[in-house]
Image (cartoon, grey):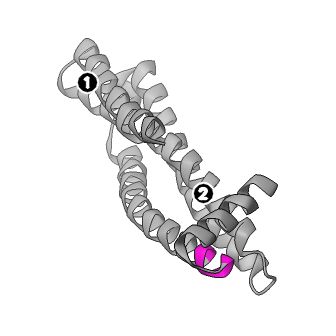
Amino acid sequence: MTDKRHGVDRTAEARGETREQVLDRNLSELLQELRVVLAGVQILFAFLLALAFTADLDERGPFAATVYTVTLMSTACATVVLIAPVSFHRTVFRRRRKEQLVDFADRALLVGLALLLVSITSAVLLVLDVVLGRWAAVAGSGVVVLLGLVSWYAVPLRRR
């Protein structure tokens, strides 16, 4: 926690802002990012819920049922984790806990993105398995996971 606080202080000093202004700006940026991510997660989740009632997953075998379950569960978990900062905010509202809220929301967004990458990859695997066959599905989902890991994690961490 001390390191985070020191980082906020350092940023405030470098930008000529108060700690509160830095935290307000950080929270605003996190909220914008969450809005973008949540829209996609909610659409995928709705599709998966509808799919359960329209697809014949039983007839597709255990592989399809397993991939569907992984996709559904990772999407549900991503949804819960990405919405968690809202609950955190409501719980600590007007208690002067903005720094803890920003720290929690930052971590929740990173975990939610990891879960979303699992969701997207497994959804691609599920669809491509039906459309193109197993090996093409594995290759296609491999491309998706590799692209996600590189663009969401490797490049930003390298620039850090």
- Quadrant for residue 94, please give it: bottom right
Kind of element beneath mark 2: helix
Front-most of residues 117 and 103: 103
Front-most of residues 4 and 139: 4
Which residues are the magenta region?
19-23
| Residue type pointed to by label 2 | Asp
Kind of element beneath mark 1: helix
| Residue type pointed to by label 1 | Gly
Q: In the current view of this chain or complex, which residue is farthest to the bottom?
A: 94
- Horizontal and vertical percent position of residue 10: 65, 63
Front-most of residues 68 and 96: 96
Residue 125 against residue 1 in the figure, above or below: above
Q: Is residue 122 magenta?
A: no
Residue 4 in view (yes/no) = yes
At 31% from the left and 18% from the top, the residue drawn is 138
| Residue 40 relative to residue 153: left or right | left
* Label 1, residues with CA under 10 Å away: few <14, some 14-19, many ≥20: some
- Magenta stretch mostly in which secondary structure? helix
Which residue is identified by label 2? Answer: 106
Which residue is identified by label 1? Answer: 140
Q: In the current view of this chain or complex, which residue is farthest to the top?
A: 135
Residue 1 against residue 122 in the figure, above or below: below
Quadrant in which the N terminus appears: bottom right
